[in-house]
Image (cartoon, helix red, strand yellow):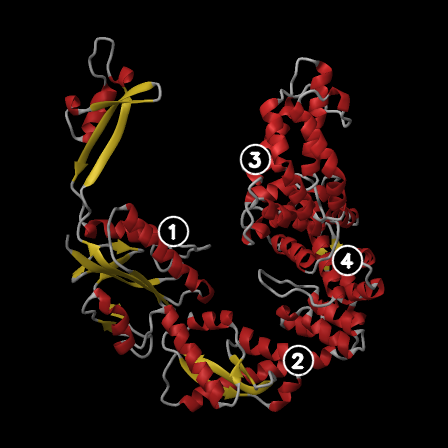
Amino acid sequence: MSTRDFLFELGTEELPPLALPELERSLAASIRAGLEAAGLPHGALHAYAAPRRLAVLVHELVDTQPEQRIKRRGPPVNAAFDKQGAPTRAATAFADSCGVALDELGRITEGKGEFLYFEGSKPGASTASLLPGIVQAALDALPIPKRMRWGASDAEFVRPVHWLTLRFGDDVVAARLLDTDAGANTRGHRFHAPQELALRSPSAYADTLREHGYVIADFAERRERIRTQITACATRLGGRVVQDDALLDEVTALVEWPIAVEGRFEDRFLALPREVLISTLQEHQRYFPVEDAHGALTPWFITISNIDSREPQRVREGNERVVRPRLSDAAFFHAQDRKQALHEWRAGLDRVTFQTKLGSIGDKVRRVQDLATHIATALGGDDARAARAAELCKCDLLSAMVGEFPELQGIMGAYYAAADGEDAEVAAAVREHYLPRGAGDALPTTRTGSIVALADKLDTLAGIFATGQKPSGNKDPFGLRRAAIGVLRIVLEQKLDLDLAELAQIAVAAQPVGTEDTAREVLDYVMERARAYYADHGYAAELFDAVLATGVSRPLDFDARMAALAAFGRLPEAESLAAANKRIANILRKSESPASAAIDATLLQEPAERALHAALEALSADVTAALAARHYDAALTRLASLRPSVDAFFTDVMVNADDAALRANRLALVARVRALFSGVADLSRLPG
């Protein structure tokens, strides 16, 4: 079967830079899925993404669909023919839709009915006729939150469309997508090569743009070129680039033809906090800061130009002119902020609303302060430090610096607290109480920082749940998912032995609104995030459910049970004992009366039940002690020795004996087995 290369390119106004990588991935995945659904074999598929274009190149795509096998089930036979055996409209319509005579249809029996059935084949369609629909479906599936229209067109896309390329080998695929007719050519750089560029073939796409169009269409290639340029430039300046992958991705999405240009600002600005300089250069200007070998910032920065200027010095001077007032503003805001101590902003927080039903940020600070004090006391920590850090943690929200650079909240507060002579750990906690800010982010390094971070996140969870604004779907405006994961990571990874059920109750009780069920809802929500946390760490869902069934609300205790259960699952006895626990759970659930806690040894008649009782007596004390000490691995290892006795019991003994006393005693015996295992987890929820 003959094949050709296929190229699709959509030329637009500048695409949203932060969304560009995901648009590229989605487009490639959707076109790949569309080709597969259409039964069109092909070779390698490569996606391209640049500021003004999205493209997909498919190698060795077949010219024609393979012959299509068709299998269709029609109406039931009793509906296809009347009582005299004459075909009904349902039968003839089905035959017509299959393109055959009625007597060419077969019959098939499925379930309790017999149906008319057609099996046949039809020639495959030409690939060129299928490609416009596949591309349109891929465009429709792009993750674009809000589409726009332009001009008099009814077409909708994330940005106005200027050209469309659809090449299948040497042929243009006739199509009109997004109100744009398909053509054979591409276009180059907006300034360096704005004219149309002829393509020898679809596979010449990237090389043509690179060699004649001043465009590097491949995102990864462009990113690597930028990384290489800024690294070489920083080395030439005697330093190294402050690495930031997110900035590198964003800049890659902003330029088609990257050219590194160095710049410099006045040394006096180096007196500003490091984060202020980095935020100004990175967040506001998309510049790459340069640091020396010791990690101290230098007055140099590197910017990526989208043109290869004949006068690079003028490009450098232009960027230096732009950054100078930004840094001057930052220096002014910093000087203004230092005219008062950090704690002097505390009263002003009472005039800033946190949430309508939950009061001001000042109210939140008071709640966090009380909860942080409680947590510090529970951990044997310094409650005075925790209270002071909680009191100061939101004060910098009223600073001029955070007003201009919101991403520096907490960071500026820490600098100001240290400058005011606050305790070093208190100052650090002001910065750290926002941590972790996202998945994989660092945790607080100080105990006080961890305490205030927990208190702040738990207060937010309790308050927002109390107002009934639980996250739904992708909507989570208060960052509750992030807060819940943060609580879990801090407690688990820093091994803080706290009871989340108790803390949730305290946090909810402090809110001005809420119901009796709110604390349970908060705990359940955090535990559902724990499910995802453990899944990410390789634990099976059944293990999580088995431990969750115990109702344990201390994450460290929960974690110890999970680790022990995972180790137990690797023992040869695990499957049999899990099956036995399922059987015991079913027996006890169906029992008309609850099992007694006492076992009457005089009623043990069968050798197998006497052996099981003896085995339980021999290990109960050790298992109970291990459970009390949270040595769950030791408890389960000891309990694994029950397997022969348990297996023999269920083979030789009838639990639901006719004699009521005998039956009750045997129920008490198996209940004792289940109780010991339940001290770790509900093994009946495990496969077995």
- The answer for how far apart the CA atoms under marks 2 and 3 are is 62 Å
Q: Residue at x 50, y 71 (%)?
A: 245
Q: Residues within 10 Å of mark 2 (few under 14, many from 20)?
A: some
| Vertical relation: 423 (above or below) 497 | below
**Which residue lies under the disc numbered 1?**
141
Q: Amino acid at mark 3?
A: Ser
Instruction: Check if mark 2's residue and mark 3's residue have beta carbons within 8 Å.
Output: no
Q: Nearer the viewer, mark 4 or mark 3?
A: 3
Q: CA distance from mark 4 to mark 3?
A: 49 Å
Q: Amino acid at mark 4?
A: Val
Q: Which residue lies under the disc numbered 3? A: 576
For disc 4, the marked residue is 368
Examine the rendering and report whether any part of residue 69 can be seen. yes
Q: Quadrant of residue 605?
A: top right
Q: How many marks?
A: 4
State how far apart marks 4 and 1 are (Cα).
44 Å
Question: Dots 1 and 2: beta carbons under 8 Å?
Answer: no
Q: x, y percentage for residue 469?
A: 64, 47
Choose between 471 and 553: the one closer to the eye.
553
Q: Position of residue 484 (x, y in %)?
A: 65, 53
Q: Quadrant of the C terminus?
A: top right
Amino acid type, mark 1: Ala
Indicate the amino acid at tag 2. Answer: Pro
| Mark 4 or mark 1, whichever is nearer to me | 4
